[in-house]
Image (cartoon, rainbow, N blue to C red):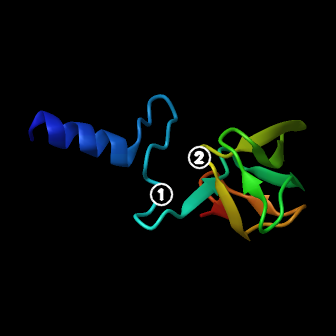
Amino acid sequence: MGRTQRLLSAAVLGNRASGTPGLRNQEAHGVIDVEAHITGTVWKIECEVGDEIAEGDTVAILESMKMEMPVEAEDAGIVTEIRCEEGQAVNEGDTLVVLE
């Protein structure tokens, strides 16, 4: 595997050591899945369908082990779908919000 292929593979798969998802959540047509980074309960949803989200904006807050942890968008976009509801139990990697 050449250097270019290794770099592309790393970008597509993400750098799991640092927790950076890379491009694995973004499809060719610009859909971005914002995923839960921990297993817990959706404490609060901070956005609505149609909201414009900037990179780093909090889209939801998860509660786990009596701690509140924000889930932030890694890319900017428009909320097209909310796939969770407050009080719902979620697992690490579950899609919470879809941006386009």
- At numbered mark 2, what does the secondary structure look like: helix, strand or loop? loop
Whole-percent x, y for residue 92 in the image:
63, 51
Picture residue at 83% right of the left edge, 46% below the top: 61
Marks 2/1: CA–CA distance: 9 Å
Identify the amino acid type marked 1. Gln
* Looking at the image, residue 1 lies above or below residue 84: above
Identify the amino acid type marked 2. Asp
* Looking at the image, residue 9 lies above or below residue 88: above
Picture residue at 44% right of the left edge, 63% below the top: 27
Whole-percent x, y for residue 50 in the image:
77, 67
**Do tag 2 and tag 1 residues touch (Cβ < 8 Å)?**
yes
Viewed as shown, does residue 6 lie left or right of 15? left
Residue nearest the observer in this picture, 15 or 73:
73
Q: Give the label on residue 26, or none.
A: 1
Query: Could one spot residue 66 in this view of the protein?
Result: yes
Report which quarter residue 70 is drawn in. Answer: top right
Picture residue at 44% right of the left edge, 36% below the top: 16
Whole-percent x, y for residue 58 in the image:
78, 44
> Along the polypeptide, which appears first: circle 2 or circle 1?
1
- The residue that label 2 is drawn on is 75
